[in-house]
Amino acid sequence: MTEKRGFLSPHEVPPVPGTEGWERMYPYYYIFTTEDKEMQEYENKSFWYYDGLHYPEPMYPFDLIWDEAWYMALSQNNSRIFSIPASMGIDHRILNGYLYISPVGIEDPEVIEKRVADFMKRAGYYYQNWDELYGKWKDKVTSLIKTVENMEFNALPQLEDESVVFEGKGMSSGFELVRKYNELINYGLEAWQYHFEFLNLGYAAYVILADFCKKVFPGMDDRTLSKMVGGVDVILFKPDENLRELAKLAVQLGVQDKIRQSAKLDDALKALGESEKGREWVKAFEGAQYPWFYMSTGTGWYHNHWTWFDRVEIPFGNIKNYIEMLEKGESIDRPIEQVRETKEKLVKEYTELLSNEDDKATFQQLLGVAQTCFPYVEDHNFYIEHWFHGVFWQKMRQLAKIFVDHGFFKDVEEIWYLNRYELEQALYDLVTSWATGVRPRGPSYWRAEIDWRKDVIEKFRQFTPPPAVGVTPEVVNEPFTIMLWGITTGSIESWLDASGVSPEDVTEIKGFPASSGAVEGIARVIRSPEQLNELQDGEILVASTTSPSWTPVFNKIGAAITDVGGIMSHAAIVCREYGLPAVVGTGLASSVIKTGQKLRVDGDKGTVTLIK
Amino acid sequence: MSKETSNVLWLHELSKDDPMIAGRKCCHLGEMLQAKMPVPPGFALTLKAYETFLQGSGAKEVILKVLEKHKQELLSDVSKFEEISSYIINDVILHKEMPGELKEEICRYYEELGHVCSDSETAVAVRSSGPISMPGQFDTFLNVCGYESLLDHVIKVWASSFNARAMAYRLQRGLALETSPIGVAVLKMVNARCSGVMFTLDPVNGDPSRIFIEGSWGLGESLVSGQVTPDKFILDKVTLEITQKTICDKAVELVRGPQGDVIPRDVPPERRNIACLSDAEVLELARIGKRIEKHYGVAQDIEWAIDDDLVFPRNIIILQTRQESIWTKKPKAPVAPRGSATELIARGLMQGIRLH
């Protein structure tokens, strides 16, 4: 008898030395407990896996807000709104700074049966009225974003403006600041309520279609399926599309050399300003920015995922690249017509392969609903993670400036070391001391704490989080767990395989074949978007997760490998779009592979071979 | 002369409705030629030729007597088949001469084939072609060269209709023991660089969206008899992408010996572990497979070879095709009862995805 393999219990994972007390950085309900015995037992019996897909870095206390947001929003849509038959929500914890999640299933068949009836009624309504509801969604989300765009966080005055008195306002800008902060936080949480309004149902439709396809076409890969379901015009590609158009316009107007020869955008704008044609291009350039330059250089989940507005040299560099390609006579148009034709051909011919009318009917039903849902699945990221978050981070930095002015932080970027609850307290401290005319308690309290927290986060960064803790479940019914994180028997097995091997001994890493092709090359491990400029032509990008907005990188790299992600993870979608081999959901690539390592990536088999 | 009364026919004269004329294999080849499938050139000996031979040579008379005499024994003691079969084949049929007219007719066709192949004693495969599907029941001979040898081997194929397995099969099914006319296909021998099989579904799980190809160096028999682990290629039938490629160590290949016989030979080390098919050949083969399946309207089990004398894409030769025999015969129940999309999704979500 071999010993039953398993993961550590969450309570057995040793702390990272020198980080003791880290728990206070996060809300108490995120901490694995040994004090509440009943809770401890639940935690022990559950399956917790590391969400490196969204959190390749340790959690900054403030950035946890988006996790809190979806903790509630995703869960409630499964459990309380749409009554997904056999699953409640997804539970969350933090372990040594890293985020772990656990799908909560329902086992009682009677309860499941009851939930089916509600699901039919509720989900049925959304599936049937999808386009109309999605239209409304766009309006309300856009209007929410504009509200936040219009918020201003200004310095507190020495003396309130006279209007406070003469218009009988009765409240101070200090109080308004506190209120505005709470509003901003709530708008953030609200945006995430909408984020999941359609997503659970969209994923459910895809997962069930994929399951049907696995039965009738056991060898069909997810790439083929996603080509049948996926959109042709995806909003996420629109920002990049604009840059291609701008490159073409520059060539048309004959001003491309002014752009190519300028090292920086500012130089280019100055040079272009000198001619009529140049000014025409500048006008087009300016017109193409809003809201598309809210495109994040990362996934948008972290404060340090700067947008193109923040890092305007990135889109400018892309425009230069595209101009170079045009000059070399290469086409920079995305083969939209070809994508559309492929999609139609796949659907038609795969349908013909089905041997009976019932299966054909089922396939058409499921494919139809998945196709209806997919524009949302593909597009919502731009609205929420890119556009909304981009605006949100800007506003938070305005607020941080006020804290800096009052001596709470040494610089704006320290704000992220307080969680949202602590920040509310700190702000109240700041405003009250301003009101009172005394020194705030905050600076002495927070500056030492922030220094300590910076050190803790750095130490967490050196720690490799285990891919999972707890007990593997019999069944997973939670649509996101299957589709987004790609949790399957296979992925869990490979995590277990790897858990006993020291990183030096690993010769092959398995993951999901996410995009076809095979290539050999040199690895470049990227841990944050800031490092992206280190990538050399043809290198293989290795990251915990990647983002579709890393467009300049995808033009350059030979292949992509990620630790976490299923077939619909951002990395997978973009690699297929760009025709790059990709292996995703490897669990450990970014911790095992070192920059400079020679690799062979097989995007058909889902393997990464380390060539010694 | 009509097809029904001919002893010998060109393959292209046959269509799929003619299995009772020249057996299934010949008809398939004829049909494939008509549908522009690249089969090797050749001709067919009809069931009538079989009868002509057995009658004309006097073999039939003897066989009837033998069987009459031993019928009761055969019915009660199955082990007797080996003995009786051996007697009929070795002591009766193989001693008979080909009747003169039939002999001339066959030789005329062989001569004509020689013109086509620019080789008067062109090497041919002599394949059995039964009117009902009984894979592997009858004998097939490869690399047959020259008139005499051809006639001998044709008789050997006919004789194999009296092998013990075939007779036992007829007895079991209540068919006449004394006769089982089979056709014979005489085909230009392919100078096979490599050869193998192709299924227009995945034989492992029946997936109709896959094309499955196995291939090995040399002639195809090494594959069938399991001496070599072949290279394996799986393609998506719709997109024709190669989704899986497994290259194996192929230590042995069957080649033509100096006397035209088939001999095993060690594969030189530099060829052992490389793919026996280029990607372009795999794709072309799959395209042909798709065309063949479309033509017959049902998944196929195909034998193919790459002819070293010819240039791509004409070097791809289809040796034979038949309906895939396992998955196409299984009744296919619908995966799920029909329902609205929401019903289907609800049912799916209830079941979940099992992890253990």
Image (tube, rainbow, N blue to C red):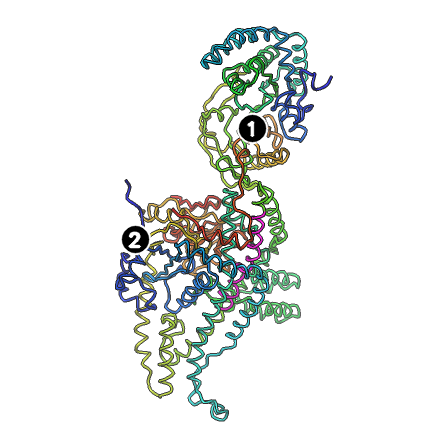
Task: Classify mark 2: helix, strand or loop.
Answer: loop
Q: Disc 1 designates what residue?
A: B303
Q: Is residue B101 left or right of residue A367?
A: right
- Tell me the CA gap for discs 2 and 1: 53 Å
Residue beneath label 2, please?
A8
A218 vs A191: above or below: above
- Which x, y percent locates residue A503? 33, 49
Mark 1 is surrounded, within 10 Å at the Cα level, by few (under 14), some (14 to 19) or many (20 or more) other residues, namely: many
The secondary structure that dominates the magenta segment is helix
Q: Residue at x 63, y 26 (%)?
A: B29
Q: Position of residue A36 (x, y in %)?
A: 27, 64
Q: Residue furthest bottom?
A: A166
Of A448 and A262, nearer the camera is A448
The part of the chain drawn in magenta is: A361-389
Q: Is residue B117 above or below residue A455?
A: above
On screen, A267 above or below A351? below
Q: Is residue A15 part of the magenta span, yes or no?
A: no
**Amino acid residing under circle 1:** Glu
Q: What chain does mark 1 sit on? A: B
Task: Residue A379: say if magenta.
Answer: yes
